[in-house]
Amino acid sequence: MAARGRWLAVGLAAAMLLATGGRAGAEDPAPSVFDIVLLSLDSDWQAMRYHLHTGESWYAYRGDWKPIPEADSTKPPAGDYKIVLSQTGENDWIAVRLERKSGRTWRLAALKWAEMKIVEGDKQEAE
C-alpha cells in the first residue's frame, strides 16, 4: 500500500506540473517544445514526455526517462506531434503518436514506435 501511495504522489505532482504548464515563477517563459502525457492504471501508472516538433519521445522508467526508438530506425519528420495513452485493461495500455499536419501515425509495439500504414480497400470488400 505504501508503494501505491508513493506512485499516487508522483502522479499528482506530474498532474500539477501539467496544470501549471511547468512554470514555477510569474515570468512568461519561451514557448514550450515538450509535452508530457500521464495515464493512471488500477495499480500502476505510465508517463511519456515528447518533443512537439520532432516526435522524439521517452517513457518513465524507474524514475528516469528512457528513449523510445523507432522500429525501423528511421527518424520521423519534423512536424506537430501529439501522443495519446489509453487504458485497455486493468493494467494494460496503448500509446499512439500522431503527426498532426500529415496524419502519419505510429503505435507503440515492444517499446518501439511502429508506423501505422494506410491499408487500401480490398476489391472483395467493395463488392
Image: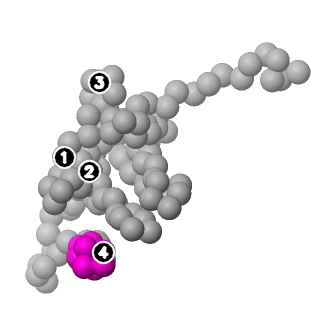
Q: Main secondary structure of the magenta part?
A: helix
Q: Amino acid at mark 1?
A: Lys
Q: Which is nearer the eye, 31 or 83?
A: 83
Q: Amino acid at mark 2?
A: Tyr
Q: How many residues crowd around disc 4 within 10 Å: few (fewer than 14), some, or many (20 or more)?
A: few
Residue 2 inside the magenta-drawn segment: yes
Task: Note whether residue 85 is visible.
Answer: yes
Cα separation, mark 3 vs mark 4, equals 38 Å
Q: How many residues crowd around disc 3 within 10 Å: few (fewer than 14), some, or many (20 or more)?
A: few
Identify the mark nearer the N-term, 3 or 4.
4
Where's residue 41, x and y in %?
42, 65
Segment tinted magenta in the rendering: 1-10
Residue 124 inside the magenta-drawn segment: no
Q: Amino acid at mark 4?
A: Arg
Check residue 4 in the rendering and tell me which mark sits there, or answer none. 4
Check residue 59 in the rendering and tell me which mark sits there, or answer none. 2
Cα separation, mark 2 vs mark 4, equals 19 Å
Identify the mark nearer the N-term, 3 or 2.
2
- Helix, strand or loop at label 4? It is helix
Identify the mark nearer the N-term, 1 or 4.
4
Residue beneath the point at 44% across and 68% down: 42
Cα separation, mark 1 vs mark 4, equals 22 Å
Q: Nearer the viewer, mark 3 or mark 2?
A: 2
Answer yes or no: do the residues labelled 2 and 1 have beta carbons within 8 Å?
A: yes
Check residue 66 in the rendering and tell me which mark sits there, or answer none. 1
Q: How many residues crowd around disc 2 within 10 Å: few (fewer than 14), some, or many (20 or more)?
A: some
- Helix, strand or loop at label 2? It is strand
Q: Residue 45 sits in which quadrant?
A: bottom left
- Quadrant including the N terminus: bottom left
40, above or below 127, in the image? below
